[in-house]
Image: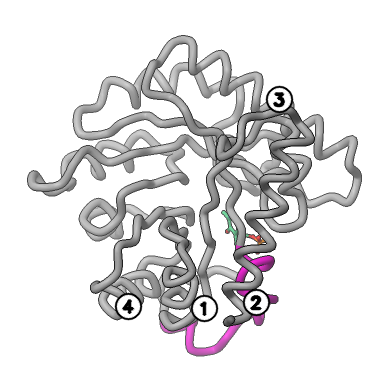
């Protein structure tokens, strides 16, 4: 068995135990494998072990892997910051965009979504802790932004994505997750297409599942520790550490 297969089994097991502990139905939480910085071969191993959903943060890096893995059945999620000169490629190559936080970007993605592809699934990224340096719509802006997005043809508003402030304080983490869940539930009442609350990463997935996540985005626990600032990645114009 490959290491990736072992880690995949163990991560799924963690998810199922957390679902069970939170008295949530089995398989109510889906697993997005976050594969930034890892070579196509690592994704191939994960796919062969049964993983279908992959998240990438950097467009150029993702496009290379997509062409190396064109023979596989993979659903690609874009989860990184989006520059407007990248929207055409993103709209053409991804099934989901989880990091939507600007109306102009949404309009471009919709306009550039190829006709032969199904509508693009989108999540609004919410800056749940109101951090000034961070991407995402603030909770106050969320409802009008969601309304705007819901009106755009070719986009399907599927839910919210949050990246809370890094902290080891569990109480603090819970507050952020609860806030996100509350916003998610309010929005889901208004928009029937909303079914996805994307929250929880390697370090906090159990807590996120307890607090209502429907999709965890897992990198390190599946692929191992990422090396920071791999020089070859600097080729990517959109690389950010
Ligand atoms: C890198 C990344 C993750 C995965 O983080 P890990 O701690 O490695 O599990 C999840 N979501 C986003 C948006 C990321 O950029």
Left/right of residue 153 with respect to residue 2 in the rendered view: left
In the rendered image, which residue does mark 2 sit on? 226
Q: Quadrant of the C terminus?
A: bottom right
Q: Earlier in the sequence, mark 1 or mark 2?
A: 1
Secondary structure found at label 2: loop
Q: Answer yes or no: do the residues labelled 3 and 2 have beta carbons within 8 Å?
A: no
Residue 68 image position (x, y, % from top left): 30, 80
Left/right of residue 170 with respect to residue 160 in the rendered view: right
Q: Answer yes or no: do the residues labelled 4 and 3 have beta carbons within 8 Å?
A: no
Residue 85 image position (x, y, % from top left): 28, 58
Residue 141 image position (x, y, % from top left): 53, 23
In the rendered image, which residue does mark 4 sit on? 64
Please tell me whether residue 148 belongs to the stretch shown in magenta.
no
Q: Nearer the viewer, residue 100 or 67?
A: 67
Secondary structure found at label 3: helix
Secondary structure found at label 1: loop
Q: Earlier in the sequence, mark 4 or mark 2?
A: 4
The answer to whether 176 is drawn above or below residue 135 in the figure is above
Secondary structure found at label 4: helix
Q: CA distance from mark 3 to mark 2?
A: 29 Å
- Count residues near mark 3 (Cα–Cα under 10 Å), then give few for <14, some for 14-19, many for 20+: some
Residue 7 position by quadrant: bottom right
Q: Is mark 2 within 8 Å of ligand 1?
A: yes
Q: Earlier in the sequence, mark 4 or mark 3?
A: 4
Q: CA distance from mark 4 to mark 3?
A: 37 Å
């Amino acid at each position: 068995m490959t290491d990736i297969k072992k880690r995949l089994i163990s991560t799924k097991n963690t998810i199922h135990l957390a679902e069970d502990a939170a008295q949530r139905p089995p398989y109510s939480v889906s697993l997005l494998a976050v594969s930034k910085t890892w070579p196509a071969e690592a994704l191939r191993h994960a796919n062969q072990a049964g993983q279908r959903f992959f998240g990438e943060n950097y467009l150029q890096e993702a496009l290379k892997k997509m062409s190396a893995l064109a023979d596989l059945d993979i659903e690609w999620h874009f989860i990184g910051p989006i520059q407007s000169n990248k929207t055409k490629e993103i709209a053409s190559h991804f099934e989901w965009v989880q990091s939507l936080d600007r109306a102009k970007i949404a309009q471009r993605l919709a306009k550039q979504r190829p006709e032969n592809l199904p509508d693009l699934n989108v999540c609004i990224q919410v800056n749940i802790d109101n951090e000034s340096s961070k991407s995402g719509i603030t909770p106050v802006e969320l409802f009008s932004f969601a309304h705007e997005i819901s009106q755009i043809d070719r986009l399907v508003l599927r839910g919210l994505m949050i990246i809370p402030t890094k902290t080891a304080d569990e109480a603090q983490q819970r507050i952020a997750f609860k806030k996100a869940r509350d916003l998610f539930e309010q929005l889901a009442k208004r928009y029937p297409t909303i079914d996805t609350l994307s929250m929880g990463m390697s370090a906090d997935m159990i807590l996120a599942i307890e607090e209502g996540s429907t999709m965890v985005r897992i990198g390190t626990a599946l692929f191992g520790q990422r090396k920071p600032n791999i020089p070859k990645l600097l080729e990517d114009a959109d690389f950010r550490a």
